[in-house]
Image: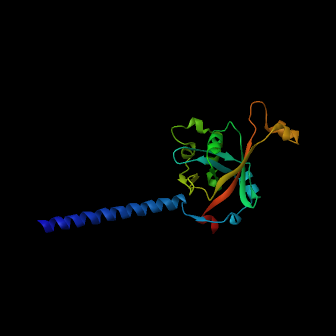
């Protein structure tokens, strides 16, 4: 009787391990389909033209953590060198929901996507996170959130992710505009004036597909 019980126990363990192995294999296949395999690169190794990447292809600015975050589509921003550091600069109006998150968090991410995700970026750029309190709007758009090393959020579908640490912020001021046409074209009494956020690029992830 004891021998039979031992045999049954080993059989159950083998079946369980085999089942877990199949589940793990399926999980890995799903991860590959999502393009989750990323490689760390240096900021100096970032591929592409930043003006085109931001201005024409767009990016997602995301701030917050796993429990609570928000993202927005942006076509304004810069990548470059400042104070001996590789930096990004992004600009956010105070009425944007993401503003609240980037204000109270030390880190934010910039995510860049292939053209196939244009519709998702359009959705994130036209819908407010305030209207998606039951489920994050990025997830509604079909994007999969994941956690960076410092707790900030990125999306697995991106081909390039920059994790940035805030090092300087400044509110644009009307009296500082030298070209008054810009002030009249982009700002009125119903819209807030952008605040600039300069962040040190502390981590860069690139999807392996983008390297080849």
Q: How many marks overall?
A: 0
14 to 100, vertically: above or below: below
Image-based side of 3 in relation to 123, left or right: left
Residue 131 position in % (x across, y down): 58, 35
Q: Which of 17 and 199 is in front in this view?
A: 199
Q: Can residue 197 be seen in this view?
A: no
Q: Which of 4 and 163 is in front in this view?
A: 163
Residue at the far top in the pictured view: 189
77 to 173, vertically: above or below: below
The residue shown at (11%, 65%) is 1
The residue shown at (64%, 47%) is 121
Q: Nearer the viewer, residue 116 or 98?
A: 98
34 to 122, vertically: above or below: below
Residue 50 position in % (x across, y down): 74, 57
Q: Quadrant of the C terminus?
A: bottom right
Residue 75 position in % (x across, y down): 72, 48
Q: Which of 111 and 201 is in front in this view?
A: 201
Residue at the far left in the pictured view: 1
Q: Which quadrant would residue 136 be assigned to in this image? A: top right
Image-based side of 121 in relation to 175, left or right: left
The residue shown at (63%, 64%) is 210
Image-based side of 80 in relation to 10, left or right: right
């Amino acid at each position: 009787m004891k021998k039979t019980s031992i045999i049954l126990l080993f059989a159950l363990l083998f079946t369980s391990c085999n089942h877990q192995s199949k589940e793990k294999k399926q999980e890995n296949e799903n991860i590959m389909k999502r393009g989750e395999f990323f490689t760390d690169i240096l900021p100096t190794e970032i591929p592409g033209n930043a003006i085109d990447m931001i201005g024409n292809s767009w990016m997602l600015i995301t701030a917050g953590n796993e429990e609570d975050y928000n993202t927005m589509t942006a076509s304004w921003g810069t990548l470059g060198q400042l104070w001996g550091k590789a930096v990004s600069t992004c600009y956010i109006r105070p009425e944007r929901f993401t503003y609240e998150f980037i204000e109270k968090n030390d880190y934010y991410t910039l995510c860049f996507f292939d053209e196939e995700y244009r519709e998702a970026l359009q959705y994130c750029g036209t819908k407010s996170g305030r209207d998606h309190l039951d489920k994050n709007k990025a997830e509604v758009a079909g994007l999969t959130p994941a956690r960076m090393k410092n707790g900030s959020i990125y999306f697995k579908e991106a081909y390039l992710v920059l994790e940035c640490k805030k090092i300087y912020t400044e509110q644009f001021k009307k009296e500082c505009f030298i070209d008054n046409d810009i002030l009249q074209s982009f700002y009125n009494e119903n819209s807030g004036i952008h605040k600039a956020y300069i962040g040190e690029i502390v981590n860069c992830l690139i999807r392996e597909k983008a390297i080849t």
